[in-house]
Image (cartoon, rainbow, N blue to C red):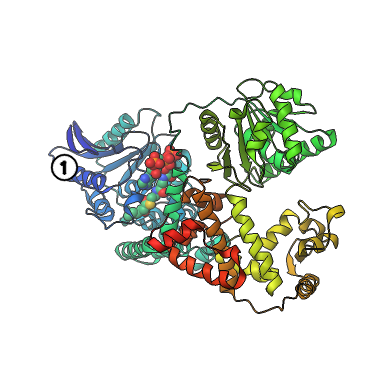
């Protein structure tokens, strides 16, 4: 065995050489790995008697792609395309042997090889689109030659990997190996190639599949239409389509050159920078400095949920999906019945869409037990309370749980705003109490705010983080404050949105600006969806806000066919003349003369106070890092990922510019805009979070 460098080794067994890459954790293609791979190919070419080459990786996976952490730095030779050229042009067959995942540049390495074999559990994908990129080392040129333009685009635009058995069906793989003996299987495959004198098979020379798409622009137009909604605001996807079209229309070398140009320009652009930042931020959020990865956590084998409403039901589904039995308790049997029915209906809808089998539906429902009494919680490892937002009620629930739950059970509240320290104080075991703040719809949204109260134990926080991972969520640890990270910042935006309509903008103006910015919906459409009457009651309503007036008029949102907007039967929203009158009248009564408000002002007034509130949250230590705040907003509130989150966005504008605008607004509109001490200090010093 020859050790080429710390990440690559070369060995020869008879007439078969092996290049083995070993660069934990995921064999990303750093400069050192690229150099090692290139040298391996040179050795394979030079060493006499070698007739075929196996390219394989050590550790938990094949190559997971380019080393994303290198993207912001000046490129170091050898660049990936030249390494792939060396592989493809080697005069001896190269077999990529894949286990784990071959992703991005890793898949492109496998495509530059002449043959591919994989463990049945392996996966293949081009996730570049999720980083605001297109494949940049031949993926858009070689893959269409292997599986056709349409299938290649499906993989490139979804960014999701395909499993080895399917990859074999599609023609990506030549052979499936025995699980656990990939290297042996790859060498046996190489032997067969040598024995039958099979030549290197270069994908650049293959054209049958792309010939079939030539002169059929409608293929690309159909795909473009199908993805336009999903990718509203994103830049990379249309280039991906253009690049695959180039594979069909242009000679290989020209197609590759254009792919490279597009990749480089996207890589240098703001969207990809933001998306790469989000990739690392999401992983960073899992790291809690005073806990570390070694904290064992408790085992959670059963969960109790209090409240069979929309939230409780959605929460329960997360655990059922992960194979964890759930007992759901509600005070009324009617509510329980409705809750169970809703869960079943949601699952059956998924089954009808082909996302689950009907057997899966039954398996999940069989894990669900309903009960009317808290005594059903005596043996649960975790109990999540999803009752009304009422402190007295929550305290009462936790005092009762304290009596019933077994020692070591974790008692969690799904409160969105309330003080978890106070709730914990209702028990004699505050160290076992934590906030688990799910986002609606709780079975869909990826975010889980893990509210660490003053006495929550490290083990409980570690368990909550591990549990988040197990149920497919991104857990972000936050501190106790009104609304935690997400809703606290949302309140700042909501406050400005309401002020803007009193001053002269209409709800649909504000919504349009935020949708253009990249949010899936604006604050008023969101209120209509959630219901304007959350926290409203007729008995205490005094027509003192626009919301109260609309509620009193029966306009309580989509569910009543009217809110800030009018809705037709298909729930399509239309600006409402009635609301326009209500707003104008309200302003008049307040003595405010409506003025024309520019889109720029709407945007800045909605977004900059959020950044300011984020700075306060950071300063108070309610979030561990600015990037955690961004992870909350991207995964819980639809902040456009290509803008990196509010804190990233503020930093990219320059904090000093944010402060200048806040101060300008402060001078006219008051202290809602006063820059927080941290923000003001950073702006002055020219630093950032
Ligand atoms: C590309 O290839 C462009 C090419 O077309 C053209 C080039 C010219 N780079 O996720 P995990 C780190 S674009 C650097 O927790 P898992 C990650 O940050 C790339 N670092 O593990 C983490 O570090 P830490 C296309 C990377 O088992 C650690 O590895 N490829 C990279 O849950 C473990 O990661 C992708 O987009 C990387 N490429 O999931 C694939 N990948 O421990 C991105 C991971 O310090 N990667 N790290 O926090 C993934 O999707 C997942 O990491 C993977 C493993 C599925 C591989």
Image position, residue 563 (x, y; %): 77, 62
**Residue in the foreground of this view, choosing between 529 and 615:** 615
**Residue in the foreground of this view, choosing between 353 and 531:** 531
Image position, residue 625 (x, y; %): 46, 48
601 left or right of 111 in image: right
Instruction: Name the element at disc 1.
Output: helix
Residue at point 81% right, 33% down? 331
**Residue in the foreground of this view, choosing between 529 and 297:** 297
Residue at point 33% right, 55% down? 71
User: Compared with residue 682, is residue 459 higher up or lower down, i.e. above or below?
Assistant: above
**Residue in the foreground of this view, choosing between 440 and 390:** 390
33 left or right of 532 in image: left
Question: Badge 1 is on which residue?
Answer: 43
Sort mark 1 into few (<14), some (14-19) or many (20+) by Cα contacts within 10 Å.
Answer: some
- The part of the image, by quadrant, that contains residue 93 is top left
564 left or right of 659 in image: right
């Amino acid at each position: 065995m020859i050790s080429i460098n710390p990440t690559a080794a070369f060995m020869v067994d008879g007439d078969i050489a092996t290049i083995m890459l070993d660069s934990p954790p995921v064999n990303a293609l750093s400069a050192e790995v690229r150099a090692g791979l290139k040298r391996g190919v040179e050795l394979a070419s030079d060493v006499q008697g070698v007739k075929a080459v196996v390219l394989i990786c050590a550790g938990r996976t094949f190559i997971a792609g380019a080393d994303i952490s290198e993207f912001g730095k000046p490129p170091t030779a050898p660049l990936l395309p030249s390494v792939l050229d060396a592989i493809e042009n080697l005069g001896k067959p190269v077999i990529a042997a894949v286990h784990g995942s071959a992703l991005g540049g890793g898949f492109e390495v496998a495509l530059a090889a002449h043959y591919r074999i994989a463990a049945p559990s392996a996966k293949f994908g081009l996730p570049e689109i999720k980083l605001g990129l297109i494949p940049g080392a031949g993926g858009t040129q070689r893959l269409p030659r292997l599986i056709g333009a349409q299938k290649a685009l499906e993989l490139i635009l979804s960014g999701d990997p395909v499993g080895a058995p399917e990859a074999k069906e599609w023609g990506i793989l030549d052979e499936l190996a025995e699980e656990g003996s990939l290297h042996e299987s790859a060498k046996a495959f190489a032997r067969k190639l040598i024995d039958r004198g099979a030549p290197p098979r270069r994908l650049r020379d293959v054209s049958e599949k792309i010939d079939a798409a030539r002169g059929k622009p409608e293929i690309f137009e159909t795909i473009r239409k199908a993805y336009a909604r999903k990718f509203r605001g994103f830049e990379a996807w249309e280039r991906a389509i253009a690049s695959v079209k180039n594979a069909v229309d242009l000679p290989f070398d020209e197609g590759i050159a254009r792919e490279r140009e597009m990749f480089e320009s996207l890589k240098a652009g703001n969207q990809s920078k933001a998306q790469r930042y989000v990739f690392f931020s999401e992983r960073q959020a899992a790291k809690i400095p005073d806990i570390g990865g070694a904290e064992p956590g408790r085992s959670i084998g059963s969960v109790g949920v209090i409240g069979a409403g929309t939230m409780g039901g959605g929460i329960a589904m997360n655990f059922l999906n992960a194979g964890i039995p759930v007992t759901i308790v509600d005070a009324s049997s009617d509510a329980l019945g409705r809750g169970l029915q809703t869960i079943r209906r949601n699952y059956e809808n998924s089954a009808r869409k082909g996302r689950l089998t009907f057997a899966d539906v039954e398996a999940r429902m069989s894990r669900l037990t309903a009960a009317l009494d808290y005594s059903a919680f005596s043996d649960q490892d975790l109990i999540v309370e999803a009752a009304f937002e009422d402190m007295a009620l929550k305290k009462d629930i936790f005092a009762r749980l304290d009596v019933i739950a077994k020692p070591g059970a974790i008692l969690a509240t799904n409160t969105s705003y309330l003080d978890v320290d106070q709730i914990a104080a209702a028990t004699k075991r505050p160290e076992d109490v934590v906030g688990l703040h799910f986002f609606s719809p709780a079975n869909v949204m990826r975010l889980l705010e893990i509210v660490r109260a003053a006495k929550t134990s490290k083990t409980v926080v570690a368990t909550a983080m591990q549990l988040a991972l197990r149920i497919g969520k991104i857990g972000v640890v936050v501190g106790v404050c009104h609304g935690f990270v997400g809703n606290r910042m949302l309140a700042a935006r909501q406050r400005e949105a309401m002020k803007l309509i009193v001053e002269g903008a209409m709800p649909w103006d504000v919504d349009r600006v935020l949708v253009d910015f990249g949010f899936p919906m604006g604050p008023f459409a969101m209120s209509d969806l959630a219901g304007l009457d959350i926290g409203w009651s007729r008995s205490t309503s005094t027509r003192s806000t626009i919301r109260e007036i609309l509620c009193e008029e029966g306009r309580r949102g989509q569910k009543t066919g009217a809110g800030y907007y009018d809705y037709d039967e298909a729930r399509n929203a239309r600006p409402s003349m009635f609301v326009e009158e209500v707003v104008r009248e309200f302003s008049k009564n307040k003595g405010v003369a409506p003025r024309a408000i520019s889109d720029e002002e709407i945007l800045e007034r909605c977004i900059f106070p959020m950044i300011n509130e984020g700075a306060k949250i950071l300063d108070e230590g309610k979030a561990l890092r600015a990037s955690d705040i961004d992870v909350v907003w991207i995964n819980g509130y639809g902040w456009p990922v290509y803008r990196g989150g509010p804190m990233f966005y503020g930093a990219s504008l320059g904090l000093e510019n944010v402060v200048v605008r806040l101060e300008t607004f402060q001078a006219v509109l008051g202290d809602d805009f006063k820059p927080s001490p941290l923000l003001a200090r950073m702006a002055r010093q020219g630093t950032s979070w």
